[in-house]
């Protein structure tokens, strides 16, 4: 008997050793996927037995369960779950008394980050209305376009944003759009309703739950607009299903009810609203809501409020790393950061400077039907796949032609999968389990994001527009956006990789890499808009030595543009479109420009004389 037990124990140890050696992430994958699957099963069972339990239903439930617990802390003021519940009821009551908007109507919301953003959002949701979150950075024509997209006939605007409507208020009135402002009547425009006055006059009692009851988990409940950096904004249709999935993000990464979440991102974006606010109330936790992100106040806020989780997106962590070093900046309770777009070089710097905060990268677009989550925490990757995940969520990486800007097709007209480790265009299959809901007001825009007849006749895939690679261990790495990647000297240049390399130069604080067209040359030449670190000076020779050592010839920036700041979107994504359009003409660009000179082994000022030689083909590139 003893021999059998010894043999069994030895076999178990051997299997464990083999698993650790050949399948090191097996159990982490299993446990994480189990959480995701069970959450999905609960949603399906709930829909079939009790009806759709929405995010707002979950909020009302938390307000009854922990009414006195802080839900939102804003500029030092505490707003409990009960406070937000009652105030959102008052918002709903105002519109109920007026008789409009009604259940099923769309209401546009134009507000900066503040507790009333959430109160108005939830109040309208309690009436069964869909809410369209308007980007506070867009103006005039783009704002009018947003109303036409989503069909909103009511607008609620923050008091500090009324000036944004100066140019379009007559047009809104012509279109019979009711405008409500979050302030009290001050004897101003009588055609603009003041919501705070009306809220003082309604009963302080709950709104009937029947008004918000959802008939389908796939019913639209929100519209979130793209930034519109290369055109007019698009209104992504957001359903109950998408909000419920997003609200589980913190929980999936290990968030708990006693966590304190720091939200410095704009609420009009899905990261802050769907993941941040939704995730906070899903846990029954507390969030610290900031009007705007401040790198200088970030760590002092984290210490003041005992923050344990923070949200990031784009270059937020880079801004923190670029701050002057301060005493005690590693003294905090932050254990987790959740977001996307964290470059590997910044990831390393962040850990080295602020401690081993667990960075939970995730991948997914507002309108997309696929999500990756880096539950392992491996540096530099956006997510992880495995055999089981691929059974549930069908996606593929396909070969992409950078010149024609389209997928490569075989002789039968179908796409071709890339090999492991190769970069390809990420496509996600549209199915009953992974639906794509598209954009409001334009079937053409919706269809444009789909690829049909990808591998077989009749199939349909969502085109993410992202170039990704999957390594031998099934980790997913983001390479670049299709529009950002360009070809030069017959090779594909990934702007993200070049920017990361430039970021290692001592005097460069930040780099925004893109391609510019040069007459008489195929493709686009690399150009980098850079910010020089305070206390440093631009050194063309040092930069030249660095790029020659670390970048292949085709990826080396031909031009450098020195900027005092890099223009970004409201969600900290670098703006490239205007830079690409402005080109490299020194007579039209007031900022310092430099050109790579291989004869002098340095970057030299780009003068009008050099510019003319480039156009005439007399200057070697």
Image (tube, helix red, strand yellow):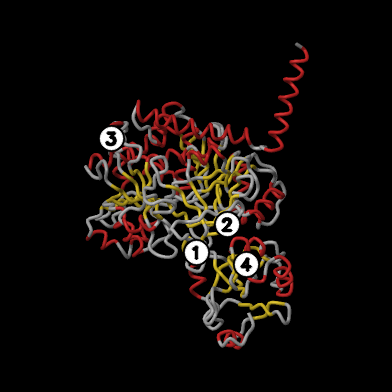
| Residue at the (49%, 37%) spot, across then down | 248
> Disc 1 vs disc 3: which is toward the camera?
1
Labelled pair 1, 3 in contact (Cβ < 8 Å): no
> Disc 2 vs disc 1: which is toward the camera?
2
**440 or 436, which lies in front?**
436
Q: Quadrant of residue 198?
A: top left
Residue that numbered label 1 is attached to: 483
Residue that numbered label 2 is attached to: 423
Labelled pair 4, 2 in contact (Cβ < 8 Å): no
Density class for disc 2 (Cα within 10 Å; few <14, some 14-19, many ≥20) is many
Residue that numbered label 4 is attached to: 531
Find residue 604 and report its horizontal and vertical position in percent: 67, 80
Mark 3 vs mark 2, CA separation in Å = 48 Å
In the image, taking residue 483 as reference, residue 8 lies left or right, namely right
| Residue 296 visible in this rendered orientation of the protein | no
Mark 1 vs mark 3, CA separation in Å = 43 Å
Could you say whether the residue bearing mark 1 is in a helix, strand or loop?
A: loop
| Residue 125 visible in this rendered orientation of the protein | yes
Q: Quadrant of residue 31?
A: top right
> Disc 3 vs disc 2: which is toward the camera?
2
Compare marks 4 and 1 and give the one earlier in the sequence.
1
Could you say whether the residue bearing mark 3 is in a helix, strand or loop?
A: helix
In the image, taking residue 337 as reference, residue 88 lies left or right, namely left
> Does residue 546 sit above or below 333 in this rendering?
below
Residue that numbered label 3 is attached to: 211
Labelled pair 3, 4 in contact (Cβ < 8 Å): no
């Amino acid at each position: 008997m003893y021999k059998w037990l010894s043999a069994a124990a030895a076999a178990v140890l051997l299997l464990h050793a083999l698993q650790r050696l050949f399948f090191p992430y097996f159990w982490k994958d299993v446990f994480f996927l189990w959480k995701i699957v069970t959450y999905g099963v609960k949603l399906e069972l709930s829909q079939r037995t009790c009806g759709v339990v929405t995010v707002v239903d979950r909020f009302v439930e938390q307000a009854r369960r922990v009414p006195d617990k802080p839900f939102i802390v804003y500029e030092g003021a505490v707003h409990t779950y009960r406070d937000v519940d009652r105030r959102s009821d008052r918002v709903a009551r105002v519109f109920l008394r007026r008789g409009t908007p009604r259940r099923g109507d769309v209401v546009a919301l134009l507000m900066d980050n503040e507790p009333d953003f959430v109160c108005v959002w939830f109040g309208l949701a309690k009436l069964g209305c869909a809410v369209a979150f308007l980007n506070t950075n867009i103006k005039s024509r783009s704002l009018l376009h947003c109303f036409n997209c989503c069909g909103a006939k009511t607008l609620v605007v923050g008091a500090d944003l009324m000036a944004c409507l100066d140019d379009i208020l007559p047009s809104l009135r012509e279109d019979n759009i009711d405008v409500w402002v979050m302030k009290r009547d001050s004897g101003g425009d009588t055609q603009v309703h003041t919501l705070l006055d009306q809220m003082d006059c309604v009963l302080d009692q709950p709104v009937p739950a029947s008004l918000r009851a959802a008939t389908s988990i796939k019913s639209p409940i929100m519209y979130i607009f793209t930034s519109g950096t290369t055109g007019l904004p698009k209104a992504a249709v957001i359903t109950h299903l998408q909000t419920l999935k997003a609200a589980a993000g913190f929980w999936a990464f290990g968030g708990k009810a006693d966590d304190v979440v720091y939200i410095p991102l704009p609420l009009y974006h899905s990261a802050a609203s769907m993941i941040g606010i939704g995730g906070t109330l899903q846990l029954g936790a507390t969030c610290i809501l900031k009007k705007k992100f401040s790198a200088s106040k970030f760590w002092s806020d984290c210490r003041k409020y005992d923050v344990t989780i923070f949200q990031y997106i784009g270059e937020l962590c880079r801004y923190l790393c670029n701050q002057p070093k301060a005493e005690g900046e590693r003294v905090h309770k932050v254990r987790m950061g959740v977001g996307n777009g964290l470059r590997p070089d910044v990831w390393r710097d962040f850990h080295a400077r602020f401690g081993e905060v667990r960075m939970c990268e995730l991948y997914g677009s507002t309108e997309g039907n696929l999500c990756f989550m880096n539950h392992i925490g491996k540096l530099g990757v956006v997510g992880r796949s495995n055999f089981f995940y691929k059974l549930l969520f069908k996606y593929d990486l396909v070969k992409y032609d950078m010149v024609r800007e389209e997928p490569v097709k075989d002789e039968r007209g179908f796409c071709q999968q890339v090999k492991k480790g190769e970069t390809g265009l990420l496509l996600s299959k549209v199915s009953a389990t992974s639906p794509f809901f598209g954009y409001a007001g334009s079937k053409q825009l919706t269809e444009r994001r789909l690829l049909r007849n990808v591998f077989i006749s009749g199939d349909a895939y969502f085109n993410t527009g992202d170039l990704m690679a999957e390594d031998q261990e099934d980790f997913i790495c983001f390479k670049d956006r299709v529009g950002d990647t360009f070809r030069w000297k017959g090779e594909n240049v990934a702007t993200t990789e070049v920017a990361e390399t430039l970021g290692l130069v001592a005097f460069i604080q930040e780099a925004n890499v893109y391609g510019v067209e040069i007459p008489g040359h195929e493709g686009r030449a690399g150009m980098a808009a850079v910010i020089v670190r305070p206390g440093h000076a631009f050194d063309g020779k040092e930069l030249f030595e660095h790029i020659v050592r670390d970048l292949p010839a085709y990826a080396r920036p031909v031009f450098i543009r020195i900027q005092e700041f890099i223009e970004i979107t409201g969600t900290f994504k670098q703006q490239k479109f205007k830079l690409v359009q402005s080109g490299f003409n020194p007579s039209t660009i007031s900022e310092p420009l430099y050109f790579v000179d291989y004869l002098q082994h340095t970057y030299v000022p780009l003068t009008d004389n050099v510019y003319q030689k480039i156009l005439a083909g007399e200057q070697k590139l």
